[in-house]
Image (cartoon, rainbow, N blue to C red):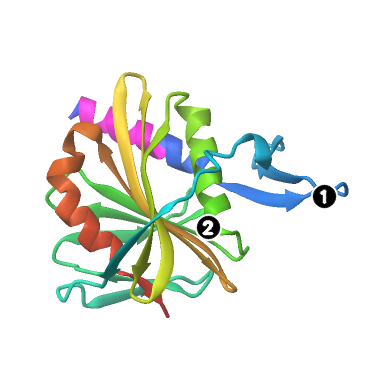
Amino acid sequence: MRLKILYLSLLLLLTTSNFAAQKAITDTGEEVILNDNGTWKYLNKTQVSVKKIASNSKMFKKPSQSTFLLKSVKNDSAYWLNTSKWVFKKNENDPAIEYQFQHKDKDLYAMAITEEIKIGIESLTDIALSNAKDAAPDARVIKKEYRTVNGKKVIYMEMEGTIQSIQFTYAGYYFSDDSGSTQLVTYTSSNLIDKYKPDIVKFLNGLTNQ
């Protein structure tokens, strides 16, 4: 139990402390990332890569078992959930994370990071990786591709990294439109990611619009 609490605490520390950032443009036209602690850094120095992102031609749709629609109050995103598998709650500790999710039977967790600011999804994934590196310097992208999910063009990205000898993996959808930006991200220990992948895919494919 003690190890499980430590594991969860480290994952939550990473998400709540390092995923909240805003993009802005200086008076000289430079794009920068503004952190909650008042620090900032140039966006063009945190780009993951300039190589083309692959596109998955498959059309992804919500599972038929996901019948409960949870809506964001910050933008137009919404999430179809299978409530026999997942529980959720509003996050009261970090304004960047609107909802937290937990699988009922597995060590699998998720969060919906929402904001009203529209950010290009390529930049959104770059910001996510940059923030992850602040907590886990070895964080890296292991998969990244465009997908069409319930008619929405998103980026699917997997990242992995290590904090205090615990290796974690994030797998999520990144989306933005005129109503704002959304990161719907699952996370678990890296040794469990393949085992939990079917549950992860079904959860993420609930992303939709209100």
Task: Tell whether 191 sits left or right of 42.
Answer: left
Q: Can residue 93 be seen in this view?
A: yes
The answer to which quarter of the image holds residue 210 is: bottom left
Q: What residue is disc 1 on?
A: 29
The answer to which quarter of the image holds residue 7 is: top left
Q: Please provide the residue range marked out in magenta.
A: 3-12
Along the line of sight, which residue is nearer the eye, 142 or 26?
Answer: 142
Q: What residue is disc 2 on?
A: 121
**Helix or strand or loop: what does disc 1 sit on?**
loop
Along the line of sight, which residue is nearer the eye, 165 or 201?
Answer: 201
The amino acid beneath tag 2 is: Ile
Q: Residues within 10 Å of mark 2 (few under 14, many from 20)?
A: many
Farthest top residue?
Answer: 165
Magenta stretch: residue 9 in it? yes
Q: Of label 2 and label 1, which has the lower sequence position?
A: 1
Q: Is residue 95 visible?
A: no
Which residue is at a point 67% across and 50% down the rendered structure image?
23
Task: Tell whether 140 sits left or right of 189.
Answer: right
